[in-house]
Amino acid sequence: MTLKNVKPSLNKIAKELEETQDAREFLLKNTREIVILCSKSIIAVHKGDLITGKKNLKQAQILLKKYKKKATGGLSRYLITPEQEFVEAACLIAIVEQKEIPSDKKLSVMSESYVLGLLDCIGELKRQVFDKIRMDKIDEATRLFEVMESLYLQLYTFSMYDKVVKEARRKIDVNRILVDDVRSVITEEKRRTELIKILEKLEK
């Protein structure tokens, strides 16, 4: 009989696939909490509450470390989104605190997650710049824009890896528009500030 080896092989494969499927469903369900925590962290930072931002980020980091143990082999791709959100929040906090942006090694994330997280962080920096301008903190707005622009220039060449890093090119295209928009606003704000200073001198 030529099929005697097929049944045990298929039984073994079915068991492996069942375990993989269970692990996939577990990751999809539980990593949502990481994404939510990172979103809360970013919102807290924009509200000026760095303590809460760091607290949520720390909780996300603990969960991410825990779930990585289940994300073996091909299952690691299900961690890209939560890792991406984690990178975005961690880097935003570092930038706001005027600290060095952490490396992928420091954050213990995959390369793709790191690149995508940095690309998303650029959008959050735009909001930070506009908030500082509204608060009449032009120097801080300028500093944040310089970081934003530098990040964009560092990441620009990654558009060529779009087939490997999913959505990299689209995010880079969007970020180009964001950087140009913020540059225009910063330039206009500086001109306005200088004009006010000149008028104040003339009034004296």
Image (spheres, helix red, strand yellow):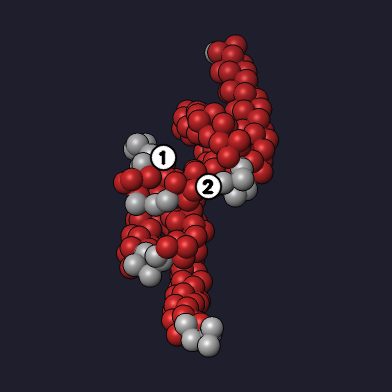
Discs 2, 1 touching: Cβ within 8 Å: no
In this rendered view, identify the residue nearer to me: 84 or 77: 77
Mark 1 Cα shell of 10 Å, populated few (<14), some (14-19), many (≥20)? some
Which quarter of the image is occupied by the C terminus?
A: top right
In this rendered view, identify the residue nearer to me: 109 or 91: 109
* Residue name at image x 39 percent, y 52 percent: 109
* Residue name at image x 50 percent, y 30 percent: 154
Label 1 sits on a secondary structure element that is helix
User: Is 177 above or below relative to 45?
Assistant: above
Task: Report if residue 133 is visible in the image.
Answer: no
Of all residues, the one furthest to the front in this rendering is 1
* Residue name at image x 53 percent, y 47 percent: 116
Q: Earlier in the sequence, mark 2 or mark 1?
A: 1
User: Is 77 above or below relative to 102?
Assistant: below
What residue sits right under mark 1 in the picture? 95
Horizontal arrangement in the rendering, residue 26 relative to residue 184 (left or right): left
Q: CA distance from mark 2 to mark 1?
A: 17 Å
* Residue name at image x 36 percent, y 41 percent: 103
Mark seen at residue 116:
2
In this rendered view, identify the residue nearer to me: 49 or 172: 172
Label 2 sits on a secondary structure element that is helix
**Residue 91 spot, x, y in % from top left:** 42, 45
**Residue 83 spot, x, y in % from top left:** 45, 56
How many discs appear? 2
Mark seen at residue 45:
none
Q: Amino acid at mark 1?
A: Ile
User: Is 58 above or below relative to 125?
Assistant: below
Q: Amino acid at mark 2?
A: Leu
